[in-house]
Structures are given as structure tokens and as C-alpha cells.
Image: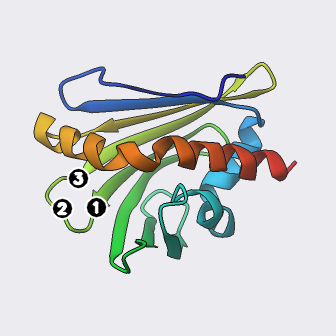
Amino acid sequence: MPADTRVTLPGPAEILISRELAAPPAMVYRAWTTPELVRRWWSGGRGEVVSIDIDLRPGGAWRYVLREPGGSLVAFRGEYREIVPGERIVSTEILETRPGAEALTTVTFTEAGGGTQLAILVRYASTADRDEHARYMRDGLTDAMDLLEQVAGGER
């Protein structure tokens, strides 16, 4: 499978991130939802994940904290809206330094030739918020997806 991460802008306030991963959907889902596994890939090598909290149920919360190389902390949080184990997760997402820029994120894990087609659709209320997200996520996204694939593939 190709190891390229595609980022498109399907709507005026949306980002779609897609990637084919050489690991089955159940393993990618597990790597996405298990704190000790998320810790291994989520930063994309751009710092140290110092805290992962996941209450994986509708109404449950999640929060990830990253220590950047300069020492500053960056935190993201949200609430799970829908969970279809192994298939789909819908949650809110907030960068804590931008609390007014809440997104609704839908992550789907679809079987594709023995691997997984991962799709992450992020919807904001405004184009400006979408564009800010696109700016800050650009650096580590492909590296995070590479690490996710390694972590998911290693869990077979």
C-alpha cells in the first residue's frame, strides 16, 4: 500500500485526511483508542506525549497533552459523540489554546485489501478555524501516520 497521507479540503470549513495503512482495521482502531499505543504515535516525533486520557464511550472525554521540544505543553481535548467499535469514532476536538475553534471529527476505519483505509474528516464552524488547523497539523501529520501504521502493524 502507498504510504502517502492525503489532505484535501472538501468543503469551506472541512479537512479530510486519508491514508492507506498496511494493518487491519481492528488493529488500527486499537492503536487509535488505547492510551499506551496512542502515546507511541500521536506526536509524530514532534515532542513527548506526557498525558493521554481516553474514556471511550458516547459522552466520554479524551485529552492528549504534548510537551514540545522547547518545553511548552500543548493540549487537545474533546468528547466522544458516537463509537462504532472497529469502524467509526465521532468526537469533538479542541486545541485548548483556541477553545472557540471546536471541530467535529469523524474517523473511519475501512477494510481495504487486507489493510485499512483511514479517513479523518474534521469539520469546523469557519474557514478561518479550518485554515489554522491545517497550518499547525501540517508538520507532523505524515510522521504521525507513519508511526500509527508501525504501531498498528506491530500489534498483530
Circle 2: residue type: Arg
Residue that badge 3 annotates: 102
Residue that badge 1 annotates: 95
The answer to whether residue 19 is left or right of residue 111 is left
Looking at the image, residue 116 lies above or below residue 92? above
Given contact means CB atoms under 8 Å apart, are the residues at marks 2 and 1 in contact? yes
- Crowding near the residue tagged with mark 3, few <14, some 14–19, many ≥20 C-alpha atoms within 10 Å: many
- Location of the N terminus by quadrant is top right
Residue drawn at x 73%, y 47% as measured from the top left: 150
**Quarter where residue 146 is shown:** top right
Residue drawn at x 42%, y 61% as measured from the top left: 59
Horizontal and vertical percent position of residue 6:
47, 26
Residue that badge 2 annotates: 98
CA separation, marks 2 and 3? 8 Å
Secondary structure found at label 2: loop
Q: Which one is nearer the viewer's eye here, 48 or 76?
A: 48
